[in-house]
Structures are given as structure tokens and as C-alpha cells.
Image (cartoon, grey):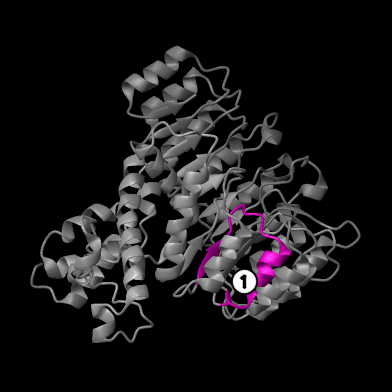
Amino acid sequence: MAILNPDCLCVLFKNFSEEQYGCNLLYTCTLVNRLWENLATPYLYEDPWKYWLYQTKDEEVAKQLIDTYMLCYKYYEIKSRITANGSSREEEEGDDDENHENPSKRIDIRDYTDEIDNVELPLYNYVSFARNLHVPTLYQSVKSWYISYHPDYDEDNIQPIYDWFLRIFELFVKEANIKNCTFADSIDDDSYPVTSDHLYQLVNHGNRVNLRYLNLGFFQCDSDALLKITERCNNLLTFKIPAQNCSDDALAEFIRSQKRLTKLKIRNAKNIDLTLEALGTQSESLVKLRILNSSLESCQKPFNGIASCSKLRSIYMRHINWPVDISISTLLMPIAKRCEFHNVDFSHTYLPADVLVEIAKKSSTTLRKVHLIGIENQIDHDKFNLSTGIKALADHCKSIVHFERDIIPKEIVSMIFFIDTIGKSLVRLEIESELMKECDASRLIISISQCSKLEILNIGFFEFSQVAFEKLILGCNSLTVLSICNSNSVNDNILKIIQEKRNKNLKTLYVFACDQVTEDAVEQLHAKTDMEVCL
């Protein structure tokens, strides 16, 4: 491999950087020779935060990472002093890249001999390699680093930690070519110290920042903050925002400012009529749309803005509150009739059956994943009956691999037809439903037994005969995960069938809240198989 040319090596190192644990390979590559070191090091530090995130948030990894960036911080301090006092070797030789050195160039200590004394300098400008800035990880890493050197620090005084975090953050803003930024985690954290001023600083004062991906997590972004970044932050491909504090006008203006948005996630929104209409400005680029936990009660017009997005392939509308004075079908039908989907998810959202029928017809050759978990107060009533939609999926969509629905008894016949028609393509089937606990689903279980490619099956609360279940175990020979929780039909005999008849692919069994199962039967299953049994 040592004779590979630099272009081939870069392809190799790029592939390593995209692997979850590729850092070990990349680090080894930096030790081969100077050429490999120069080429591999930028990839090693392109997304440094994943080494902490993927390695169970190892405190030592965080410390080493910030130790490295502290060397860079000291280097920039010295460099700034030299610049203030006169020209450096670089300036004498000329630097036509907006005063930014070549990131892959090793730092020449000769430039700083008179300044460094005993200060250790980094081998490379590691900060400039970063393309991804994960701000929560940066903060947590700085916190871990600070505590490692100050084990007796006062937990009530986070100011020293915050000060060091801010110094390193500002260093990334000034020197890194940031393309992707996760500004906050997708969890509420009152102690997280980042403010809208930091967002403004990143977008408007970053010398080399040109964001393509911006995830605001649960950061409380208000209208003023969004408007302040609208002019400079207009090249996004992916944008994720919690919109509870943001006005419809501000969010709509931000959407319209984008040149080619491909993925959009909006959560906790209220009254976003203008925003939904503004999505029409992204009609040539938008591929994935997620609207979560939002109120659309003010909407009075069909969603033509969304429907105009001809490339839209994935739509999530979870936990949506609809208006009461207009037909939901009227709002959704333009989307169903004009967009060809790969993935639809209306979990915990009321979906009319006629809309599902039209989705099945329009997306007949493309639809692969369907998620239709009902609303919280769903009952076995015609209002919630999706039988005609499920039958339409069977009639038109032959490539569905994942189907999720807490089915109601009224849908059993259509589900049997669905499974009998397209079951051979299914890889994942999740139809757990508390409403099925008093209903014999043996016939449906027998149909599922024909799903030879099925790998994951959830039939919690279902009642069935032992004969039907044995056919299921024998027929679904690709099954790896089986969930049969909360079922009165699950007893020691069922576990014995699993023990004796299962295919060796089956590795995980969930049997929570199955009162007919004894500890002896579970111990026997553990002893006779290598399965993980979750009680």
C-alpha cells in the first residue's frame, strides 16, 4: 500500500473517516511515513466529536481532544502576538489565502523560536481541519478536560469551564471551515450555557464557516435569532429547529432564503401556515420533511406548498393537532396525489383512510416504509379504521419492507389480505396493539408465517393458538427479533416451541408482562439456546 499515489490514499482515508471506529485505522496511518501522516491527519480531525460520542463518552478521549486543541489555542495566541508586533516568516513569504495557512502544512516552529520559550506547539493546525462542530460535545469535552486538571472544582461555579469553552469555541469560529453544526442536543438541558449570541457569532463572524447542516436540537431559537442569521445562513441542505418560540413569519422567511434545502425538521411549532406555503420555494430540492409535535389547527388551505415539492420522498407528521373546522383530507390530499414517497410516517396523528388510499396509488412503485401508529385515544371505531387504506397498500405497493401500525380488530381482514399479498417482501412488521388483547388473531399469525424475509416482528397483546404460533416459528426462518409481550397466549409451551422449532437466526425474545410464563421455562430457554430473553 505504500506505493499508492496520494489520490488513492485520500480515497482510502476518507472511507476510514466515515467508519464508526475508523479513527484507530486513521491514527495508525499517520504513523507510516510523512506523506501518510500529512494526508491522514486532516481526515482524523475532520469530525473529532464522534470519537467521544461513539465511545460511550469516554472522559479520557475528551481530555486528549481538548489537550490537542489547547496546543492550538496557545499557538494562535503566539501567532497573534507576532502579528501584532510585526511580520512573521509566513507574511514575508506571502500568503494569498486570506491570511489562512495551508491546513495540511506542518507548523514550522522556526517561525516562533523567539516567542515559544518552553511552550509546546502542535504539529498541525488541527482546528482548521474541522468540518463539523458539535457544540454540546465541545462543551462536555471542555468540562471533562477542566475537571481532570481541577478535581476539587466547585460544581456551583461553572464560569471557569464556560470561559475555556468560549475560548475554544471562538477559535473554531475564526479558523475552522465548518460545514456542519449541531448547535444543541435533542434533549432539554437547563444548564447548557450556549445562547443565541453564539449562534449569531458562528454564522455571521465565522471567517470560513459555510453551513450546509444546522441542527438546533432543543435550543430555544426565537424569531430575532432566526432573522439575524437568515442573510448569511442560506446554503443549508439540512435544517432542524424547535419552533415554539419562533414566529411563522420569521420561519417562513428563513425557508424562502434557502437556495436548495433538501431536509427539514420542525418540532413544537404553532400556526405555521406561512411556513408550509413557503416550502414551495424548495420544490426542486426538498427530499425529506419532518413536522413533529406541532399544532396545525390554524391551517385552512390545502398543503399545496408541500405538494409542489416534486422530489419529496419522505414525510413525517407525528403528534399533529389538526383543525376542527376543515376536512383533514382537504389539507392532505394534494400531497397524497402529487408526491411519490419512499417513507410515510403519520404516527400518533389522525390520518383519514382516503388519504392513505391515494398515497398507495401515487407511490405504488416507490413506497417501502409505512408508519401508522394511531392517536392516543384510538378505539375500534369506523373513524379510525384504515382497512381501505391497508387494502390499497396491498393492491398497489409491492415493495413495502417495513410496516408499523397498532391495528384495531376492524382491520384484521384487511391485514390478512395485506400480508397474504405482499408479505414476502416484508422485513420488519410491528403491529402490537392493546386493542387486540381480546381478539383471536390466529388466522393473522398463520398469514405472517409466510413472510420468509421477516427479521423483526412485534405482535404484543395478540391472542393466538399454539398451532398458529408453531407455524409462525417454522415459517419465519429469517426472524432475528420477536416481541410477544403482554399476551395471555404466551406460556411455557410457547417458549418450548421457540426452543425446539426456532431457526438459529432468532437471537432476541421479548416476553414482558406475560403472566403465564414461569421462571423455570425462561431458565430452560437460556440453558438450551444462545438467545437473549428480555422479561
Q: Nearer the viewer, residue 42 or 79?
A: 79
Vertical side of 102 occupied by 433: above or below? above
* Residue in the foreground of this view, choosing between 517 and 202: 202
Between residue 142 and residue 465, name the one nearer to us. 142
Q: Quadrant of residue 498?
A: top left
Q: From the viewer's perspective, tell me whether residue 193 is left or right of residue 118.
A: right
Residue behind mark 1: 229
Q: Amino acid at mark 1?
A: Ile
Q: Is residue 136 above or below residue 237?
A: above
Residue 289 screen position, x and y as percent = 62, 65
Is 403 on the left or on the right of 10, as rendered? right
Q: Residue at x 40, y 38 (%)?
A: 147
Query: Total label count?
Result: 1
The image shows residue 158 at horizontal and vertical percentages of 52, 41
The image quarter in which residue 28 lies? bottom left
Label 1: which secondary element: helix
- Residue sitting at x 62%, y 54%: 219
Work out whether residue 426 can be spotted: no
- Image check: 51 left or right of 7? right
Residue at 47 percent of width and 45 percent of height: 161
Name the residue at 62% across, 43% down. 190
Q: Is residue 244 above or below residue 526?
A: below
Residue 223 belongs to magenta span: yes
In percent of width and height, residue 204 lies at 56, 73
User: Looking at this rendering, what residue extends furthest in the left direction?
Assistant: 3
The one nearer the camera, 52 or 90, is 90
Region rendered in magenta: 211-234
> Which quadrant is home to the N terminus?
bottom left
Q: Position of residue 485 (x, y in %)?
A: 56, 29
